[in-house]
Every structure is written in C-alpha cells, then in structure tokens.
C-alpha cells in the first residue's frame, strides 16, 4: 500500500532573504538570512528529505527512483519520460527585492541546460504595505533597447510594477521578465528547474564583496519582448462542503494547485482525501494545523509542513483547522 509521508525542506540563504520562514513557520533552520525553503523537491541543488514512515531519512528523489509508481502516470508525460518530480514547491521570504530575471521554456532549457524550463505560480501568503512585484514589460521592446536600459540603469522605466496583497495569485510563464519585491511572503509552485537568467541586480554585492553574475546574453535568447498588461486577479470560486471549502487556483500543463480551507472543528465530520493513479499530491500547510490519517498512518501537521501523498494512496482523512495548498500534476 502507498502511504503518505512528511517532508523536511532544503534551505537557501540569499542576500535578499529575511527571517520570517523561521519566525512565522517555525522552521528552526540555522541560516541568516533564510531566503527560501524547498519544501517538495527532488532537484540536485536542494532535495527534500523524508522525515516520517518507512522511508525516513531518505532523499525524496531516491525514493521516487525506487518507487516511480508514487509519481503517477501524468508526471512522466510532463517530463518527457524523465523520471523526476515535475514540480518544485518553495516558501520565499523577500525581505529585499529579488533580481529582475527571466526563465527559459522547456525546449531551450533541455537543449542548453539539460533541465526542464521554469513556468511558475506565486501565491502571496502575506505582503507588507506597499509591496509590489515586476511582471513583464509595459511596452514593446527590442533586445538593443533592453541592453541600453540595463547599461544606463533605467530598466525600471519599462517594467510593469504591480501591487501585491495577501491571497493574490500570479502565473508567470517562461520568458516573462519578473521579480518579487521586498515585503512579500510567497508560496511558489514551479517546474522542477533551477535555471535563472538575471538581467539586473541593483549593483548589489554579496558577503564576498562581489556582485552576483548576470546572464544577459542567455536572457536575450528566451525573453518575451512584447508588452503585457499588468495581471489582474482571476475570478475565484469557493466550493463548500461539510468541514471544508476549496477553490482551484491554477491549472496548467505543468501543475494544478487547489486551496483547501479545512475546518472540521464544528462540523464533527472529516474531509476525505484520496488520490488516483494519475498523479501524486503535495499538501503544503500555509496556516493552522491538523491531522492526516488513514489505515496504519497518522500525520499531525502544522503551519509550514509539507506532506507527500503518493499516487494511488490509501484512502485518507483530514481533520483540523488549516489552510492547505494541494499541488498535483
């Protein structure tokens, strides 16, 4: 039988990070700044580790190589037959602005980077007053115009600057110039890739006293130079049932993300959860706490925890008061 298990994240310290992943999510990771936690990842740059059940202590990627049936059938189509988790789930604390950057699509990345491309989704968990992000150009550009603007540091004049608020949702296709702004706390669901081409990094220097490298030539090969409207928040519809409400946040060729609002405290009924053979599920608790259990398994979870539910899992039940992002393919 296929049982769910808890994951422990890989952690990343970048110069723009803060302390909220420790302060708000209780990560207890000795890293300052703590910029990202890779909650569900098989990427070589940072793998999640199983911290419950029979696979405790093993890297998630090793388990999926041993048990590819845990992935389900659809992920193999997404990865073009590559035996890997198609997605990567992160928590991101942007105390300061991230670099202005762009990611390649699958075709370019597979050819030049031996990697999947990087289309991603951001779900805003919290945002300080005045927080914003960069999303696309506000007018049609040419490569030379972009290069000139980078050279004279006027690139900001050509970018869409979009205010962000708690519970906002943004879908960023590969090729879109973008950046998370200071003060945003983000859950990111993306393709399983760590390929980033930096266009502009505000001339910052790291702890080593050196500026981080830029990748302008590579970015020019993949960037969408057409103007794009500032994104508007999509219409979202909550579906209610005893003990829970849910809404579909995004469905694209790479992943599907549903937000689940669990509250079984007053209904005295449990929310049933079961996977088919099509896909695994990753359950990221972004608020509250609860218990996932079924025959032979009981997993208490808290804010910031991530649970991997294999495809064709045993029937499961959820109990508690929590907000969960349910990610599948």
Image (tube, rainbow, N blue to C red):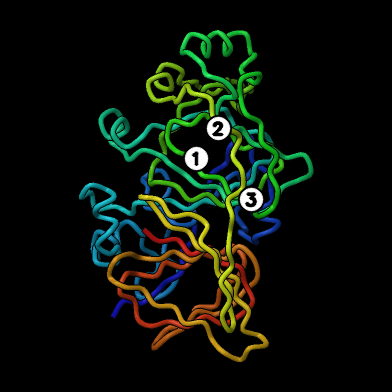
Mark 2 secondary-structure assignment = strand
Label number found at residue 168:
3
Residue depicted at 36% across the width and 73% down the height: 275
The residue lying toward the viewer, choosing from 63 and 31, is: 63
Residue appearing at x 61%, y 43% in the figure: 232
Coordinates of residue 218 in the picture (x, y in percent): 39, 21
| The C terminus lies in quadrant | bottom left
Mark 2 or mark 1: which comes first in sequence? Answer: 1
Task: Tell how many labels.
Answer: 3
What residue lies at 62% left-to-right and 29% top-to-bottom?
160
| Disc 3 secondary structure class | loop
Label 1 sits on residue: 172
Between label 3 and label 2, give the one nearer the viewer: 3
Q: Say which quadrant the N terminus sits in.
A: bottom left
Q: Is residue 252 left or right of residue 186?
A: left
Vertical relation: 229 (above or below) 76: above
Q: Quadrant of residue 75?
A: bottom left
Tag 3 near tag 2, CB within 8 Å:
no
Residue highlighted by disc 2: 178
Identify which residue is drawn at 64% across, 36% down.
Answer: 133
């Amino acid at each position: 039988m296929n049982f769910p298990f808890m994951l422990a994240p890989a952690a990343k310290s970048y110069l723009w990070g803060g302390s909220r992943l420790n302060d708000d999510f209780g990560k207890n990771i000795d890293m300052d700044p703590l910029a990202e936690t890779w909650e569900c990842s098989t990427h070589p740059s940072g793998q999640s580790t199983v911290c419950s059940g029979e696979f405790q202590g093993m890297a998630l990627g090793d388990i999926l190589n041993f048990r590819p049936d845990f992935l389900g059938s659809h992920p193999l189509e997404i990865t073009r037959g590559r035996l890997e988790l198609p997605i990567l789930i992160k928590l991101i604390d942007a105390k300061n602005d991230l670099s202005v950057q762009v990611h390649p699509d699958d075709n370019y990345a597979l050819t030049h980077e031996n990697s999947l491309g990087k289309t991603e989704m951001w779900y805003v968990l919290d945002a300080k007053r005045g927080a914003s992000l960069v999303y696309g150009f506000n007018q049609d550009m040419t490569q030379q115009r972009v290069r000139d603007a980078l050279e004279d540091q006027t690139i900001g004049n050509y970018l869409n600057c979009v205010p962000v608020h708690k519970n906002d949702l943004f879908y960023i296709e590969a090729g879109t110039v973008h950046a998370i702004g200071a003060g945003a706390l983000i859950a990111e669901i993306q393709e399983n890739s760590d390929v980033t081409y930096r266009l502009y990094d505000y001339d910052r220097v790291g702890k080593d006293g050196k500026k981080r490298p830029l990748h302008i030539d590579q970015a020019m090969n993949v960037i969408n130079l057409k103007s794009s409207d500032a994104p508007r928040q999509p219409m979202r519809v909550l579906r209610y049932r005893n003990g829970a409400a849910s809404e579909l946040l995004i469905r694209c060729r790479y992943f599907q993300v549903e937000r689940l609002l669990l509250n079984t405290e007053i209904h005295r009924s449990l929310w049933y959860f079961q996977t088919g053979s099509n896909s695994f599920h990753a359950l990221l608790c972004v608020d509250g706490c609860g218990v996932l259990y079924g025959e032979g398994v009981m997993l208490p979870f808290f804010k910031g925890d991530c649970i991997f539910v294999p495809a064709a899992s045993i029937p499961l039940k959820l109990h508690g008061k929590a907000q969960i992002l349910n990610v599948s393919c």
